[in-house]
Image (cartoon, grey):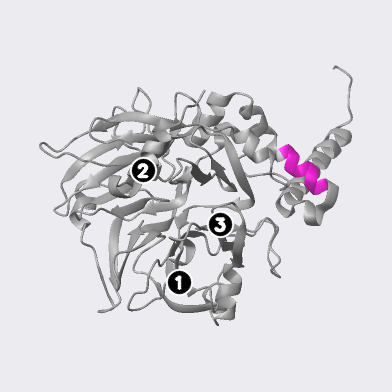
Amino acid sequence: MFVRVPLWTLLLAILAGFLVTIAMLVAARIGPSKAGTLGSLAQNLAETPRALKALVPSITFKDTMRSRDPAPALPPGFSAREAGFQDPGYLLIARSDPKLYRSVVEIVRIRDGKTLHRYAPDIAEANARSHLARPRDAQPNRYRMTHPLLLEDGSLVFHGDSPLVRVNACGKLMWTVDGIFTHAIEPDGAGNFWVPTTYPKSSLPFVGSNFQEHGIAKVSYSGKLLFKVSLAKILDDNGLYRLWGPRAYTDDPFHANDVQPALKDGKYWRAGDVFISLRNLSMVMLYRPSTGKIVWYRMGPWMLQHDVDILDEHRISIFDNHARGGEEHDDGAYRVDGHNNMLVYDFDTDRVSAPFNAGFSKNRIKTFREGLQTTLPNGDLFVEETVLGRLVRIAPNGNLRWRYINADDEGQRYLLNWSRYLDPERYGKAIQVALAGKCS
């Protein structure tokens, strides 16, 4: 410890350490595909802090699932109910549970806030079936059971930026579809599901090892991959390479977050067509898988939007995050400009309206990423404010029908994971089957 060392030796050691550090950073950025063994070693070292934190579930969970956006501390559960209003529906709440340190899905009766059924499947078992080198969010305390879909037999389909998973009413694994599935899961009315997907490794030229080549996929009720196509191919084949290729380079140029199928013919689309939301292009397009053609597209006025819904034969709605880039943020570089909104595009008039602007403004709904909306049978709107852990039902005049908060006992908010409003007319049978399941 006290041996004398020549100054030149010390300076040489410092220089060598500096050069090794730079080399490891570069190798980690390039990845194993180009940097070989050194790249693998660098990436493993970079993952060490995350791996150590994963040994303590509560630390890992809070680090990844708590909301970092400022929000009033509110008690968990339902509150702010409108006097005299009775909601007959149910919620399929997908949430990060701060007591269990994991993601769960719950069937909740709105009128009294009672949790009737909970899905908490073995995430490690589902990920173990994957043949990917490293399934995303493999640690159960980092996994988000995203946009679960309740089927008539009480089973559930979901993903966690991971293989697509189906479990029965008791949470037992039924099947998985290997791959990286992301964001919304939408039924096509014929027993199949449309889901955005990410290719594990892009085959496009002139992109880096971290490039996210997104696509869309169609999966059958029994867990068979029926259709898959790259968004780059869709755009390129339709002469729209200019929308993404010449831009300043980014590893995530598309960021598909919803594939909404048309269940029947409309004035401007056919049954089987799909509306696709491309967040990072602020673009919504109508794509016809049967011909490979883009029938229509529009970029804005929505900004970094999510969740396209078909309202009738000539109108669609879009959840407008209305977010801008630029200001650095704990969870990214986006900030909401004012508040979110639900925008309606009318193909008949080529105009965009904001029928719930008062409700979004009055209730200060502002999730900078994710978020969804559902128009309810009576004209109300169901909204998930994902990052701030809030669900609301808003009347057309902007009044709040009720509010649900996902938080711990101290009022710290935690992420929601794309919940659904369950209309009893449509989902009543599935709810009863799920509740009747005898689970040990």
Residue closest to the far left: 84
User: Which disc number belongs to residue 429?
Assistant: 2
Question: What amino acid does circle 3 point to?
Answer: Ser
Please report whichever mark, 3 or 1, sits nearer to the chain's N-terminal start: 3
Q: Secondary structure at mark 2?
A: helix
Where residue 360 appears, as percent x and y from the top left, is 24, 52
* Drawn side of residue 325 relative to residue 252, left or right: left
Nearer to us in this view, 299 or 195: 195
Residue 122, by quadrant, is: top right
Please report whichever mark, 1 or 2, sits nearer to the chain's N-terminal start: 1
Nearer mark to the viewer, of 3 and 1: 3
The answer to whether residue 423 shows anywhere in this view is yes
Spatial CA distance of label 2 from label 3 is: 21 Å
Q: Is residue 339 magenta?
A: no
Which residue: 50% across, 41% down? 145
Give the residues in magenta: 38-45
Q: Secondary structure at mark 1?
A: loop
Q: Is residue 43 magenta?
A: yes
User: Which disc number belongs to residue 273?
Assistant: 1
Looking at the picture, does residue 220 appear above or below residue 84? Answer: below
Residue 84, by quadrant, is: top left
Which residue: 55% across, 75% down? 235
